[in-house]
Each structure stands twice: as C-alpha cells, then as structure tokens.
Amino acid sequence: MLKKIIVTMLSAALLLTAVPITAQASSDKTVASGANATSGSAVVASGEAITVTPAAITYAKAKFKKKSVSLYPDQTTKLKIKWTKGEKTKLTYAVEDDAIARVSQKGKVRALSSGKTKVTVTTEHGDSSSITVKVKKLNDNKTIYLTFDDGPGSKVTPKLLKVLKKYNVKATFFIVGNQAASNKKILKQIAADGHTLAIHTYTHDYKKIYKSADAYLKDFHKTEKLIKDVTGVQPHYFRFPGGGNNHYMNKKIRNAVLKQLHKEGYKEMDWNASTGDAASSKYYGTATLVKNGRNSHWGKGPVVLLQHDTNAKYHTPEVTEKLIKHYKSKGCTFAGLDNYHGKELCFNYR
C-alpha cells in the first residue's frame, strides 16, 4: 500500500513539471497591438509569457455636412459637422478671407461683404475639411419695410390688417405689451397673417424704462414673454421708444441694452423714412402724411418706413393704402423685417 502511495505522488510531481507556466506576465518581450492583440491579455509563444500594449485609439474625422452655404451681409449661421466613428477631438476653425466673412471657434459664421471665401475646420490630428461661404450682394433698393409702432390698437389695427391683406403686403408691428395684453385676438391675427412681430417695450413709459439698463430689459422681456405665450412666435427685432438716440436715454444705458440684446439674438431697427404721424393727427391730414411717406429714402437702399397703429392714428389705414399703391407703381416690393438682410439700423449707433 505504501508503495502505491509513493508511486502516485511521484507521478503527480512529474506531471506538474511537464506543464509550462504561462500565467505569469513577462517584461522580456512586448508585442505591439494588432488584429489579435487584446488590452491586458497575454499571448503565449514557445512557452514564453508575452505582454501586449493597449489597442490603438482610432480618432474621428470631422467633415462639413454641406459643400457650401449662402448668406447675405450681416447674416450668421452655425456650420454643421459630421463625425466619422472614433474618438472626437478639439476643432479649430479658420477663414480664408476675413473681409468677406468671419468664423468663431464654435463654428458660427458671420457674413460681412459680398464675395466667396472658404472656411476650414481641422482636428487636433491634422484632418481637415472645407466649406465655401458665398456672401450675396444685396439688391434691396426697391424693398419697402412698412413698420407700425405702439399698437395693436383695437380700432385702427384691424382696418390696417385688411388693407395689407387686400394688397398681399407684409409689414412689421413693433408691439407695446400693455396694448397687446388688451388685444390678444388682434395680436394673434397679426401673426396668423404672416407679419413680423417685434418688440417696443411693455409700458412705453420713457421715465420708467430709461431709468437703467436693468429697468429697460425687465420691461422688454415682459413683452417678449407675452408675444411668445399668445402667438408662439420668437421675435428677433426691437425698437427703442423714441428711437435709438433720444433725450430720455443716455449712451451708457443704450449701449448696455444693445450689448445684452445682441447676445440674445436681437437687432435694433430704427427708421430712415416716416409719414410724420407721431405728431398730433390734427396737424397733419392724409395728404400730408402720404406726401411725407413718398419723400423718403427710396432709391438709396431699403426703405424702413415709420407709422403708428394706435387708435389715435386713425389716418394710418388710408395713408398705408395710398403709399402701397404709390410704391407698387414704381416697381417696389414689400416685406416684413424677418426678410431683412441689411445692417442693423440704430440712430448714432457705434
């Protein structure tokens, strides 16, 4: 029995010595990762333990989704990128001619002047892609932008909307919030008819809104919220009551307001033509208002014509109809400011 035990133990010892140990990691040889290499594993060859390096990282390439993009001066757009599979890296943007357009490091392009240029995006590993930016030349000399401040008025605005619809003309309404709050149905109709909704503060109270930049912005955003809640429209334009340079607002407040609202995507739009109806209606009849509207900026660029649609401005629908006929006879077209592609129009703006 003792002999059997000894023989069994010897057989087991011989069997153990015959098997090579492969579980140990060896630093004698290293194999670069390849098709069969796996991070953290060992490959056994001829009884030797071999370690491997981690699998190589594949970096993604970035390409523009489009070959070209067209803009008008002062328009902006975000360039869209398509990535290949792999690890994404930081991107760097560059423009060939910054007199035609500029690009931010977030891929936002701003058109400056007519012409063509290229924007290139490059990854940290040197892969690049280019897109052509075409900036169109403005031909806006015969476009009339009718703008109406201080409404909507319960009596005047509905009549005005009928005139605009009759001639298939789009216009822009600079809304006063406390007027719109009482005329929500009319506000909805303005939007439904395809006109541009813009902001002209909530109270139109010069002493209140021009007390500070914060006071103006608080009043402004109240109107913004009302317009969005009632119509679902996000406005893009605003107009300072009294214009961008008035005796109630100092330059410091104006510039602070402009800086903040530019960040929010707004443009300030004053006017380069007017019927003069800001004065009391008893001083100017329809004929004089029409004459003032004709003696405008026409032929020198787009006409941004100021009128008002509060109930006190009862001449507005009739004056507007006569001006539409006059400008159409000269081959002009009409549009809301949502279709405006020119520079921001702000009195004495720097």
Image (cartoon, rainbow, N blue to C red):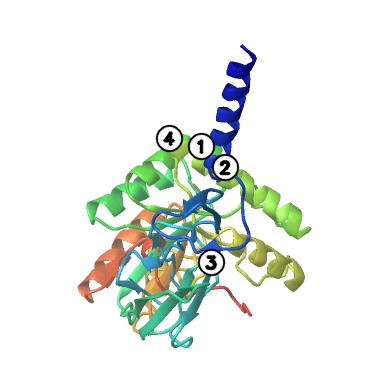
Q: Are marks 1 and 2 in contact (CB under 8 Å)?
A: yes
- Identify the residue at horizontal 59%, vertical 76% (top origin): 347
Mark before the other along the chain sequence, 4 or 2: 4
270 or 267: nearer the eye?
267
Mark before the other along the chain sequence, 1 or 3: 3
Q: Are marks 3 and 2 in contact (CB under 8 Å)?
A: no
Q: Are marks 4 and 1 in contact (CB under 8 Å)?
A: no
Label 3: which secondary element = loop
Residue 18: image location, x then y, percent: 53, 41
Which disc number belongs to residue 192?
A: none
Image-based side of 339 in relation to 254, left or right = left
Q: Are marks 4 and 3 in contact (CB under 8 Å)?
A: no
Pair 4/2: label in front:
2
> The disc labelled 4 sits on which kind of residue?
Lys
- Identify the residue at horizontal 37%, vertical 67% (top origin): 63
- Marks 4 and 2, Cα distance to the nearest angstrom? 16 Å
Residue 220: image location, x then y, percent: 63, 51
- Tell me if residue 119 can be seen: yes
- Tell me if residue 296 can be seen: no
Find disc 1 in the rendering and name its residue. Answer: 229
Q: Are marks 1 and 3 in contact (CB under 8 Å)?
A: no
- Label 3 Cα crowd, 10 Å radius (few <14 / some 14-19 / many 20+): few
Which corner quadrant holds the C terminus? bottom right
Find disc 4 in the rendering and name its residue. Answer: 185
User: Measured along the vertical axis of the image, is residue 119 above or below residue 191?
Assistant: below
- Marks 1 and 2, Cα distance to the nearest angstrom? 6 Å
Residue 111, image quadrant: bottom left
> The disc labelled 2 sits on which kind of residue?
Lys
- Marks 4 and 3, Cα distance to the nearest angstrom? 41 Å
Find disc 2 in the rendering and name its residue. Answer: 225
Find disc 3 in the rendering and name its residue. Answer: 106
